[in-house]
Image (cartoon, rainbow, N blue to C red):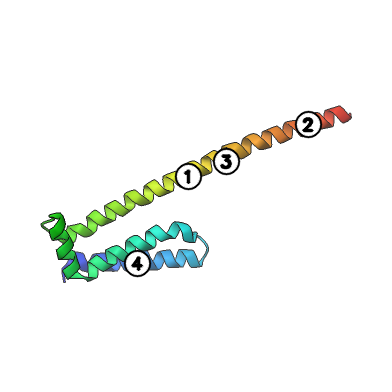
Amino acid sequence: MDLILVTATIVNILIFVSVIELIRRNRLKEKYSLLWLFSSLVMLWFSVSRKTLHYVSGLIGIQYPPSLIFLLAFFFLIIINIHFSTVISRLSDRSKTLSQEIAILREMLERDKEAKE
């Protein structure tokens, strides 16, 4: 087995185990971990299954099959970044709305206090 495939297998196993551990310790939500788990399993499959790796890389036209693993890693990282960008954008909008609502409520409370005095 090539050194690159052995390295890719070890790295993918480490990523998978790390994500599981982060979930177990409540540091990563399950819904955000699905992409990481799926991508590590797909890349682990290609790292372990030489026949599949050579077949798919031949279909795509990649001359050096282990480079397919790096292409997949790059592809999954782009997808994960897009996913987290949408989550961050949504949270940013919610945070802005909540801040505005809190400011309005504070203003209303101060006006009520002034009216009572």
Residues at discs 3 and 1 in contact (Cβ within 8 Å): no
The earlier-in-sequence mark between 2 and 3 is: 3
Is the residue 97 above or below the residue 59 in the image?
Answer: above
The residue at 73%/31% (across/down) is: 107
Q: Amino acid at mark 2?
A: Glu
Q: Amino acid at mark 4?
A: Leu
Q: Which mark is residue 88?
A: 1
In space, the residues marked 2 and 4 are separated at their CA atoms by 55 Å
Dot 3 falls on a residue whose secondary structure is helix
In space, the residues marked 1 and 2 are separated at their CA atoms by 33 Å
Residue 44 rendering spot, x and y as whole percentages: 28, 67
In space, the residues marked 2 and 3 are separated at their CA atoms by 22 Å
Mark 4 lies on residue: 14
The residue at 62%/37% (across/down) is: 99
Mark 3 lies on residue: 95
Dot 4 falls on a residue whose secondary structure is helix
In space, the residues marked 4 and 3 are separated at their CA atoms by 35 Å
Q: Amino acid at mark 3?
A: Ser
The earlier-in-sequence mark between 2 and 4 is: 4
Residue 50 rendering spot, x and y as whole percentages: 18, 69
Question: Badge 1, how many Cα within 10 Å: few under 14, some, many 20+?
Answer: few
On screen, residue 72 versus residue 92, left or right, reads left
The residue at 69%/32% (across/down) is: 104
